[in-house]
Amino acid sequence: MVKLRFEEPKECIFSNIYTMTQQLSLFEKLEFSTTRIMAFDDAGCKQYGTGFFYDILVDKGTIPVVLTNKHVLHGMPHAQINFSRADESGNPIYGEPYKFRFDINSGLVFYHPDSSVDLCAIAFQPLLRQMEGADLKLFHQHFDKSLIPTVAQLKELDSVEDIIMIGYPNALWDEVNNIPLVRKGITATPAWLDFNGKKEFVIDAACFPGSSGSPVLICNIGNVKDKFGGIQFGINRIYLLGLLYGGPQQTIEGEICVKTVPDATQTPYALSSIPNNLGYVIKSERILELSEYILTLKSATYRV
């Protein structure tokens, strides 16, 4: 039986980001919103992807999870996620991450109930309980449903919007400081439309192995342009649009096919397909579906 404990509600990553007392800027906070995921087996095979911290909000508190793609964990029995540490004042320590290893079939992973939706959540409350008994503090920044745009907010977006994506492309990262890479792109299809009838949209951005599970965001700081050319100053618009899972690739024979963004591995392989610098993004409304599913699981019990 899975036991999930409600945690005390914490301030969302983007709450009150412009108060003078904040020690980190918005983009500095974003550097601590993701984690590098390594899935591995006992024979030494490894595959890498991206996950990001998300709080499932409930009346009694929150359930903290890491969101990623199902295929990042697929076929492996074990996984590891990295956490930055905090100093005595609660500030982040760059480097020396805490490495949390767990068995994928231990009941900590919750899969979206629709098998066609490449989304899952990793509950890391056992790690938090471990930290309670040790003199260690963790530092991470989380998203929650307050950043997921409504249908009305999506329809206010233009067909082409600037986006950022945070992750570990080709398993690259600042290993010394435990910092991911932040990259920019644009929406290639309107985020309010369902691309090819699926709860997805397309971005124009370089999507490399290891980027699977990367959060895709709109971050307009200081001013916002509307779709008709008007500009509002002193306004911020921050949306969690979804997470990357795959994209179209061209085979050496010239055929266009859709593939999940492959996991970055340490094993060299021959390239047989060419990325088109396009990525398919699962809409964030799927995150809400998964959250509701986790809360309604009959096999789960919740301990305050």
Image (cartoon, rainbow, N blue to C red):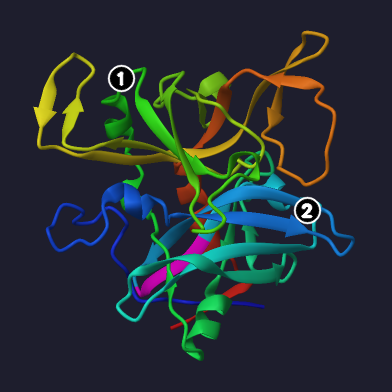
Disc on res. 17: none
Quickly name the residue at label 2. 46
Look at the picture and state if 145 lies above or below 154: below
Which region of the structure is painted magenta? Answer: 60-65
Name the kind of residue labelled 2 in the image.
Answer: Lys
Look at the picture and state if 137 lies above or below 281: below
Rendering quarter of residue 159 = top left
Rendering quarter of residue 103 = bottom right
| Rendering coords of residue 153 (x, y %) | 27, 33
Disc 2 residue crowd, few under 14, some 14–19, many 20+, Cα 10 Å: some
Look at the picture and state if 217 lies above or below 274: below
Visible in this render: residue 296? no
Tell me if residue 215 is in the magenta stretch.
no
Kindly state the secondary structure of the residue where label 1 is placed. Answer: loop
Quickly name the residue at label 1. 158
Q: Is residue 96 left or right of residue 6?
A: right
